[in-house]
Amino acid sequence: MLRAGVSLPALMHLLGHKTLDMTLRYVQVTQNDLQKQYHLARQNMVSAHSMPQLPTTHPLNGMAPGIPTITQYLTTLRHLLEMYWRQVGDAKIRRQLERWTNRLAKIAAEVHDLDGAKR
């Protein structure tokens, strides 16, 4: 029933058990079940934490990028740097990348303020 999509609490009620402990006595978790749940959880994390996309227009195609495009580039670059510095083993390099990420955050805030002042 669990593999067919019935939740554990629903199965507990269907079997007439008062506690999940009793229901769990009848449930056998296999390696395939664990792998399936692990991959589903990873897919959910990927969709919840998606990478910002860079604009498809290139600034050299004759059109000057506007403030929104610059902001989007800065956001994406900050995201990529943050993902990278969290994986770096060398503490000195990691601190440097973290500083760059913080600087980009300040620049993005200033660009945002510039856009507000322009209006």
Image (cartoon, rainbow, N blue to C red):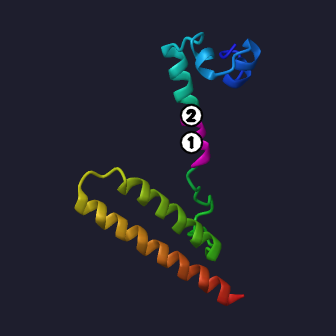
Q: What residue sits 23% from the left and 55% below the top?
A: 90
The quadrant holding residue 28 is top right
Instruction: Please identify the quadrant where the C terminus is shown.
Output: bottom right
Give the label on residue 45, or none.
Answer: 1
Residue depicted at x 61% and y 73%: 65
Front residue of 77 and 98: 98
User: Front-most of 61 and 78?
Assistant: 78
Q: Quadrant of the N terminus?
A: top right
Q: Position of residue 87 (x, y in %)?
A: 35, 50
38 left or right of 2 in image: left
Q: Against 117, is 91 above or below?
A: above
Q: Residue at x 64, y 83 (%)?
A: 115
Residue 63 in the image, given as x and y percentages of width and height: 64, 73
Q: Is residue 30 above or below residue 95?
A: above
Kind of residue indicated by mark 1:
Met
Depth check: 59 or 110 in front?
110
In this rendered view, identify the residue nearer to me: 41 or 100. 41
Instruction: Report helix, strand or loop for mark 1.
Output: helix
The picture places residue 103, in percent across and down from the top left corner, at: 42, 75
Label 1: few (<14), some (14–19) or many (≥20) C-alpha neighbours in 10 Å: few
Marks 2 and 1: in contact by CB < 8 Å?
yes
Region in magenta: 42-49
Most common SS among magenta residues: helix
Q: Position of residue 77 (x, y in %)?
A: 48, 63
Kindly indicate the quadrant of the structure image that contains residue 93. bottom left
Q: CA distance from mark 1 to mark 2?
A: 6 Å
Residue 41's disc is 2
In which quadrant of the rendered view does residue 86 lie? bottom left
| Residue 65 shows in this picture | yes
Left-right relation of 22 to 14: left
Q: Secondary structure at mark 2?
A: helix
